[in-house]
Image: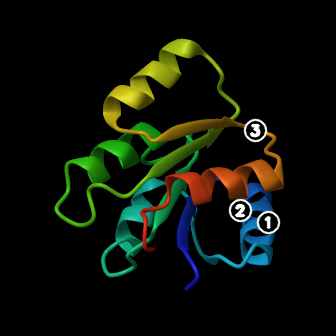
């Protein structure tokens, strides 16, 4: 059974890169352009893993993490942060908020796929 991934990034180019990398790895990929768009698409989607950028308009990645972790729908879904940011204080803030992992852009396709498999719930 294929894993379902929700990838959130405000860059159309990055969304295209994620769609290509993840779909070619056999994942069912859903894309959102920011946190608000993602939360509107989230109900009923049941993603196995969420990948989110940090810096986005309307709602940033921290808002996404908070909304998922404090929500009633799949609050334990693994969340990988994929961003250009590398500051330790931001990584620490994301971990405290409930992020599962942190990957710095540009990403390596194989490492991203491996990270998704590592954090995906057993039996997914």
Give the residue number, with chain letter if any, for mark 3. Answer: 105
Query: Which residue lies at the image location 36% right of the left edge and 63% below the top edge?
Result: 39
Q: Residue furthest front?
A: 123
Rounded to the nearest angstrom, the CA distance separating label 3 from label 2 is 13 Å
Using the image, determine if residue 27 lies above or below residue 34: below
User: Residue 115 vs residue 66: left or right?
Assistant: right
Query: In front here: 36 or 66?
Result: 66
- What's the residue at 30%, 55% (across, down)? 76
Quadrant of the snapshot with the C terminus: bottom left
* Residue at (45% x, 68% y) in the render: 48
Quarter of image, res 32:
bottom right
> Which residue position holds label 1?
21
Q: Is residue 39 left or right of residue 124?
A: left
Pick whichever of labels 3 and 1 is earlier in the sequence.
1
Establish if 107 lies above or below 120. Answer: above
Residue located beneath label 2 in the image: 15
> Answer yes or no: do the residues labelled 3 and 1 have beta carbons within 8 Å?
no
Q: Nearer the viewer, residue 88 or 123?
A: 123
Q: Residue at x 63, y 50 (%)?
A: 115
For this view, does 19 lie left or right of residue 99?
Answer: right
Image-quadrant location for residue 28: bottom right
């Amino acid at each position: 059974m294929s894993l379902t991934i929700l990838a959130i990034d405000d860059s159309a180019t990055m969304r295209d890169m994620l769609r290509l990398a993840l779909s070619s790895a056999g994942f069912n990929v859903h894309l959102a352009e920011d946190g608000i768009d993602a939360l509107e698409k989230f109900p009923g989607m049941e993603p196995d893993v969420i990948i989110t950028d940090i810096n986005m308009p309307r709602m940033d990645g921290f808002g996404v993490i908070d909304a998922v972790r404090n929500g009633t729908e799949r609050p334990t879904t693994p969340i990988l942060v994929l961003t250009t940011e590398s500051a330790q204080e931001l990584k620490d803030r994301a971990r405290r908020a409930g992020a599962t992992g942190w990957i710095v852009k540009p990403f390596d396709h194989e490492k991203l796929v491996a990270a998704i498999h590592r954090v995906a719930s057993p039996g997914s």
